[in-house]
Amino acid sequence: MEPAVFANFVARESIPGSQLSEKPPHPRFRLPLVGDVLTTDFAKPCQRLAEQARELGPVFEQKLFGYPAVIVTGVEAIEEVNDESRWEKHVGHALMKLRPLAGDGLFTAYNSEPNWAKAHAVLAPAFTKSAMADYHAAITGTVRELTDLWSTTAEWIDVPAATNKLTFEIIARAGFSHSFGSLADSNSGSFVEAMVRELSYANRRTDVLPLFEKVFRRADHARHEADLAHAHAVVDDIIEARKHDSHRRYRDILDLMLDSADPETGERLDTVNIRNQILTFLIAGSETSANTIAFALHYLSTRPDIAAGVRAELDERWPTPEFPDIRYDDVAKLRSLRRVIDETLRLWPTGPGYFRRAKHDTTLCGRYRFAKKDWVLVLLLGAHRDPAWGHDADQFNPTDFCPTTFAACRPASTNPSAPAPALASVASSRTTKSPSPSRHFCTSSTWNPTRNMTSTCAKPSPSSPRVCAFEHVVDVVRRRSDRSPVEANLHQSV
Ligand code: HEM
């Protein structure tokens, strides 16, 4: 998902100023009625907020048209809002805009919706280490198709667009044994195009401007309605076809959802919820992974010294020029490449934030009072560049992820002997994952929705979907030649 989706967080629920014992700071030049419009970057809202965090953080407020949002970027403040006893996951305004598409899928489900817990129970086996190993062949096979395509093209390559197609295709093949056939397809009417347009539609920041959408965006709205209907119809067809497939030989996530029941209640997922989960995986897993690959390739193309190290690691393992036979167990051993991905995700967390909501009246940093249901945006983009990471926090330096360096540069606020929260929230914020929500899928080796992820995410496991992203990069880097247009053009494309 693009950073802008998360940045589009304008509050629809207000936080009355009187409830705060001390008001968090806010940007200068605030105007009556319209608020912080002069200091908001409507094109790059997350990046602007991350800049402002340096002056205003660790907790500050942005207000637009009377709607305030509290932004949290400091390590210790994030630890507090990750405390499950006081705060919980919140479907913020940005995610609300995806509800028409993904309904009560895991990403956009409200905490109170029964399907949320049911789906967690049913889907748990899809995120174990052995499940990840099962997806491996689909992943490497799809990557090979892309790199073969790249090696024969003389055209300029739009890397983020290509990696988006790649990740959509991988999720569809690995999860639902379905191909959108989209890698080489420039057909703008395709499902992938419709999905990408839907995500852009949800990204819009202009919806905060009164009447702007109604006056200037009518055509977009009509397009959105058509894309929504198309996406639902395509996924419904996939589900129906599988239901009526008498051979049912696949063992994938779709089968799991159709055939399994919640072990506690014995209840199954209904068809609409299965559609919502499929769309959720495509939404939550595609742009995040695709943009991580694109950013990583960008860094490798601009840092030949680091690229040489990664290439040497790959050449050592696969000395011949053929497409490498990457086995699932190889992935965790590619340390240099892994550090590149970690550092890429630190600087450009492609899920740049998440929302948390107070479970009851509480305080933050001992200064700011929050009423039950007040919410904050944890801005990972700001947190990952917090001064606690040192003076060079803006620099791309994968060696920071060597075990010794990582220990040394850990912010002083963390206590390694504590059960976990501080160290792990820092570690997970370095690796972009939401530091703690126990609902988070992406950081655990054997995913367990009931466990607090802060205790497991300090050491990313080979089963993390993040590793899938990093596998793609392995292949792409391995295949590219020094004279390939891909390498020459990466810098400009990202
Ligand atoms: C680099 C890749 C990825 C990044 C950076 C990333 C990041 C995130 C973040 C920050 C959240 C928390 C959002 C929130 O609490 O509001 C999240 C949630 C989620 N992600 Fe990922 N993600 C990645 C890959 C994937 C993949 C490959 C999938 C599935 C195929 C996936 C599925 C999900 C789901 C279902 C949730 C919602 C979990 C829940 O609340 O129950 N993600 N992701």
Image (cartoon, rainbow, N blue to C red):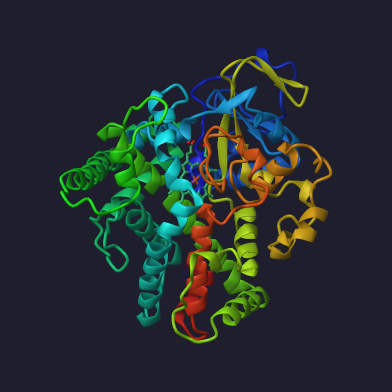
Q: In this rendering, would 332 be left or right of 408?
A: left
Q: Position of residue 167 (x, y in %)?
A: 40, 58
Relative to 155, does residue 267 appear above or below in the rendering? Answer: above
Image location of residue 473, percent across then percent down: 51, 67
| Image position of 298 with respect to 248: above or below | below
Residue drawn at 70 percent across, 30 percent down: 80
At a point 67% along the width and 50% down the height, the residue shown is 430
Q: Is residue 333 left or right of residue 251?
A: right
Residue farthest to the top? 18
The residue sitting at 73% across, 65% down in the picture is 399
Q: Position of residue 346 (x, y in %)?
A: 64, 53
Decide which of 363, 391 is in the foreground and name it: 363
Residue 494 seen: no
Residue 247 placement, left or right of 266: left
Give the vertical position of 468 relative to 93 (above or below).
below
The total number of labels drawn is 0
Q: Based on the displayed image, in which of its 4 quarters is residue 98 positioned?
A: top left
Q: Is residue 262 visible?
A: yes
Q: Quadrant of residue 413?
A: top right
State which quadrant residue 309 falls in. bottom right
- Residue 177 position in % (x across, y down): 29, 55
Foreground pick, 48 / 353: 353
Q: Residue at x 42, y 46 (%)?
A: 126
- In this rendered view, identify the residue nearer to me: 19 or 356: 356
